Amino acid sequence: MPLKFLVTNDDGIDAPGIEALARAAAEFGEVTVVAPDKAHSGCGHRVTTDEPIHIQDAGTGRWSINGTPADCARLGLWHVLPDADWVLSGINSGANLGVDVFMSGTVAAIREAALHRKPGIAFSHYRKSGGQFDWSRATEFARRSIGELIQQPLTEGEFWNVNFPDLTGQPEHQPQFVPCTLNPLHLPIHFEAEATGGFRYRGVYHDRPRATGDDVDVCFSGNVSITRLSVWRP
């Protein structure tokens, strides 16, 4: 029997990253997409409990909902594809490294899946300032990651977090796929006061601290970081 994949994201159902991920997953089984009708970047594990969540058939095995990524995982597993073998999320337009996993809607969808005892993989794509997303290349990275990770057993509550590097201007570079630890340090914090009032976050993502061999270091060094996480511990 072919594997059944439930695919979601936090960039919205029409984002290029989810198309790339669905294409990669289709090489290993049947793909059903349940994704937000709009972007919910940085929403974390927020869920909708105070209003109805509507599902719309977007055609060819795709379903759009007016909810968050965690809602998509919940409703996808409860209503659309309860017999899913794996839940995949992404490919996010931007990295989800280190403490990002606590703020990321992309990762929250997979954490929600893990709470439902379903194995899952969150995928994100780092981009430097001025860099470009190469979704064709990312599709190949996702295909290779899926092929390797679905063969590796997870214990209850565990899931994978995968980040692809920015390889702008490096067409010949072949990244390594590196199992690594999660960087525990906070993002750079800097706010600028605005003339109209309030403050705007201006922290520089690439300036975040890193230690040799952690996920930030691996991804920033041009390789694919692969981190095993758990809903019960970092």
Image: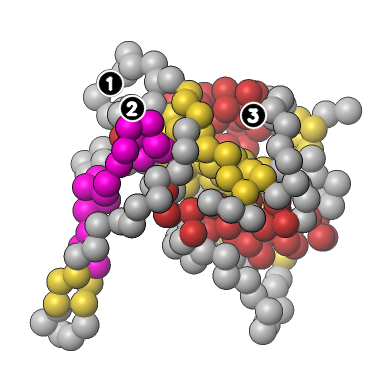
Asked if residue 125 lies left or right of residue 229, the reply is left
Q: Residues within 10 Å of mark 1 (few under 14, many from 20)?
A: few
Q: Look at the numbered disc 1 and give the secondary structure of its residue.
A: loop
Contact between marks 1 and 2 (CB within 8 A): the answer is: yes
Q: Nearer the viewer, mark 1 or mark 2?
A: 2
Q: Residue at x 73, y 61 (%)?
A: 74
Is residue 214 found inside the magenta-colored segment of the image? yes
Residue 149, numbered circle: 3
Q: Nearer the viewer, residue 109 or 59?
A: 109
Contact between marks 1 and 3 (CB within 8 A): the answer is: no
Asked if residue 231 lies left or right of residue 199, the reply is right
Q: Residue at x 40, y 45 (%)?
A: 183
What residue type is disc 3 on?
Leu
Residue 222, numbered circle: 2
Asked if residue 49 lies left or right of residue 141, the reply is right
What residue type is disc 2 on?
Gly
Estimate the spatial distance between the alpha carbons at disc 1 and disc 2, rounded to whole Å.
9 Å
Q: Residue at x 65, y 24 (%)?
A: 147
**Residue range of the region highlighted in magenta in the rendering:** 201-218
Which residue is situated farthest in the right direction here?
1
Which comes before the other along the chain, label 1 or label 2? 1
Residue at which label 1 appears: 170
Q: Nearer the viewer, residue 185 or 5?
A: 185
Say which quarter of the image contains residue 5.
top right
